[in-house]
Amino acid sequence: MKSCVLRATAWAYLCGSRWRPRRSPRLPVRVRRVVALLPEAGERAGARVWAGLRPATPSNVPLVGRTRHRNLFLDTGHGTMGWTMACGSGRGLADVIAGRKPAVDFEFT
């Protein structure tokens, strides 16, 4: 039988790259809540904790576009909105790289 994965997101910590998810007292609370909401989704004993670093800029405005280097383009700094904004900024950056006018209307770097 193929295994399935339920990804439950919880929060974002703005604290640097040394933070480790297992140290947070919030994790057991979050696991209990997910199990209460979705009891058929799996076993609590099988829950794994993961945290990914999400680059963010101080202004929370991502860096998308050209750099001073001819073949280096940026699409970073989306912070907690990375999954939400990835498709639009990726599409716009592809247009910039291809020399087309981007369909999305925001200032590229």
Image: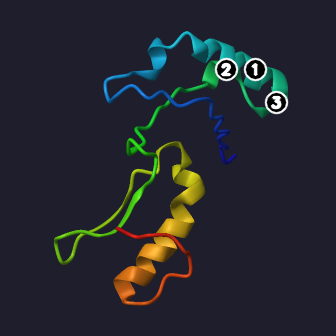
Q: Nearer the viewer, mark 2 or mark 3?
A: 2
Q: Which residue is mark 3?
A: 38
Mark 1 crowdedness (10 Å alpha carbons): few <14, some 14-19, many ≥20: few
Considering depth in this image, is 42 or 107 the residue closer to the camera?
Answer: 107
SS at mark 2 in the image? helix
Task: Using the image, determine if residue 100 lies above or below residue 68.
Answer: below
The CA distance from mark 1 to mark 2 is: 5 Å
Contact flag, marks 1 and 2 (Cβ < 8 Å): yes
Left or right: residue 97 versus residue 39 is left
Task: Using the image, determine if residue 11 lies above or below residue 98.
Answer: above
Mark 3 crowdedness (10 Å alpha carbons): few <14, some 14-19, many ≥20: few
Q: Which residue is mark 2?
A: 30
* Residue at the image position 43 percent from the left and 79 percent from the top: 94
Spot occupied by residue 93 in the image (x, y as percentages of width and height): 42, 74
Amino acid beneath label 2: Arg
Q: Which mark is residue 33?
A: 1
